[in-house]
Image (tube, grey):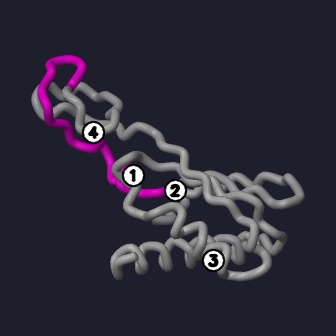
Amino acid sequence: MNNTEDVKVKIACGKFIKYCKESNLFEPIAMVTLIGTYLSRAIDISLLESAVRAVGLQWENAEIVYQETPARLECNQCGQHYNSKDDWWPCPNCGHPEGSALSPLPFQIRLKEIRLETGKVIKARKNTIIG
């Protein structure tokens, strides 16, 4: 792991712990579901999972699940809004190869939900940014 990855993982891990403390979640965590686009995969999820599990008993069995969603783009030529695929695909309307992200969210990883070992699912507050 390079220094940049190490810092990103530590920051994201710290945000999980802080979120749980602020939400009074002290029960064992079974799974954390994250959502983001292919553009936001700057954090290695397996490294993040290892870091989270190392925090302590509450997190020792936690699994990190990453759900990918398409980024919303606007064509730089015709202004058409569309979902991206695996890359900055051409505009489906005019074929222009370049688009601009409609918001900074395509570059962020958001917390979707936390599943406790009891089976209870806690939905995250809207737009809780993890990475």
Residue 127 — which label? none
Indicate the amino acid at tag 1: Leu
Circle 2 sits in a helix, a strand or a loop, which is it?
strand
**How many residues crowd mark 1 within 10 Å: few (<14), some (14–19), many (20+)?**
some
| 13 sits left or right of 100 in the view | right
For the residues labelled 1 and 2, the Cα–Cα distance comes to 9 Å
Counting residues from the N terminus, which is met first, the one under dot 2 or under dot 3? 3
- Marks 3 and 4, the one that precedes in the sequence: 3
Query: Is label 3 in contact with label 4 (beta carbons under 8 Å)?
Result: no
Quarter of the image that includes the C terminus: bottom left
Residue under pointer 3: 18
Image quadrant in which you'd find residue 26: bottom right
User: Is 101 contained in the magenta span?
Assistant: yes
- Mark pair 1, 3: CA separation: 21 Å
Closer to the camera, 124 or 52? 52
Cα distance in 3D space between marks 2 and 3: 14 Å
Query: In the image, which disc is placed on residue 105?
Result: 1
Picture residue at 23% right of the left edge, 31% below the top: 89
Q: Secondary structure at mark 4?
A: loop
Q: Which residue is mark 4?
A: 87
Which amino acid type is shown beneath numbered disc 3? Lys
The three-letter code of the residue at mark 2 reads Arg
Q: Is residue 18 left or right of residue 86?
A: right
**What is the magenta range?**
91-109
Residue 110's mark?
2
Mark 4 residue crowding within 10 angstroms, few (<14) / some (14–19) / many (20+) = few
Task: Look at discs 2 and 4 and give the one toward the viewer.
Answer: 4
Q: CA distance from mark 3 to mark 4?
A: 33 Å
> In the displayed structure, does residue 103 sit left or right of residue 68?
left
What residue lies at 71% left-to-right and 58% top-to-bottom?
Answer: 31
